[in-house]
Image (cartoon, rainbow, N blue to C red):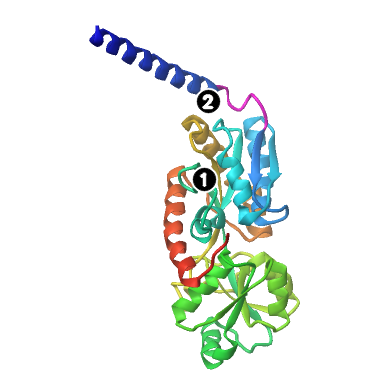
Amino acid sequence: MQRRLALIAAATAACSTLGLFAATAAHASDWPAAKPITWVVPFAAGGSTDVVARVVGQELATSLKQAVVVDNRPGAGGAIGVQSVARSPADGYTLIGGTISTHAINASLYKKLPYDPVKDFEPITLIAYVPNVLMVNADLGVNTVQELVAWLRKNPEKASYASSGAGTSTHLTGAQMADLIKVPMQHIAYKGSPQALQDVAAGNVPFLFDQLTAGLPLVKAGKLKFLAVTTKTRSPLAPDVPTTAEAGFPGLDLVSWQAVYAPKGTPKAVVTRLNADIVKALKTPELKSKLETQFGMQVVGSTPAELASITAADTVRLGELVRKSGASAE
């Protein structure tokens, strides 16, 4: 009798599992017919993550024949928006625009992060790299990275750098440089990129790292100078500006990135379709040109596995930088 009951229980469990698989497969085959897709941006409108969501989302809507709605949910360094997606149904109708901050840096920056960047999400694709650029005050009297390093060593009491906030990629790139050249430097954190850029332009802080497009107007106005980009190749927006490797500092290579994820458990068929459609959109000349020439990004388009590998590697690498810098957030 006990053996018969065990066999019945096993058969019931198997049927339930098969039923669940069948329901999931049926749901995935119907996707995305049920409703619009929400692409959550965990930052305010107007930034790089918002631009990516709107530009790529428009192409995705066309290929899927379903509306893609961009939903800005800023706050807590992106944690509020990311947490909301982690708790959303894994049905393919909610995506998150993830960045090097939300899915790599925050894991070490926050003592109690309300989501797990790896366990709570399905990677879809790395969309683009966003170069950080070393910028100096135009009147500082330096024209190369080597000259800036010499100036910092000669003026240790003035050795400082600005950033758009503690724990941001712009902060950690400065921390990476300080560690690389072995010069103690004071980090001066601002509440955003505009304030940091203006203070460097005014000569209150000698230099900073920031996105190329953010500093371009002040460079054209003669208030800042670009010294090097942190990417492996030069930017088409500033082709005369060398890479940090070309400038003699190959170890100075922290590059921000933009990606997209779905909640953990999203059907594999949905993840595969999203990846294929987004990567295809990124290869279209118009979209690629818009992101590269208007916003200074380096378009990528990766497999989910490649994004998972990048997320894991940067979490470890940047976690060490966060610890060395002493940055933290509640």
Front position in the image: 86 or 232? 86
Confirm or deny contact between disc 1 and disc 2 (CB under 8 A).
no
Front position in the image: 1 or 34? 1
Front position in the image: 177 or 64? 177
Q: Is residue 263 above or below residue 328?
A: above
Magenta region includes residue 31: yes
Residue 89 picture quarter: top right
Judged from the image, the secondary structure of the residue bearing numbered disc 2 is helix
* Magenta highlight range: 30-36
Left or right, 302 with respect to 131, comes to left
Q: Identify the mark nearer the N-term, 1 or 2.
A: 2
For label 1, the crowd category at 10 Å Cα-Cα, with few meaning under 14, some 14 to 19 and many 20 or more, is many
Magenta region includes residue 154: no
Residue 256, image x and y in percent? Answer: 55, 60
Residue 320, image x and y in percent? Answer: 43, 66
Check disc 2 and give the amino acid type: Ala
Point 39% across, 14% down: residue: 15
Mark on residue 125?
A: 1
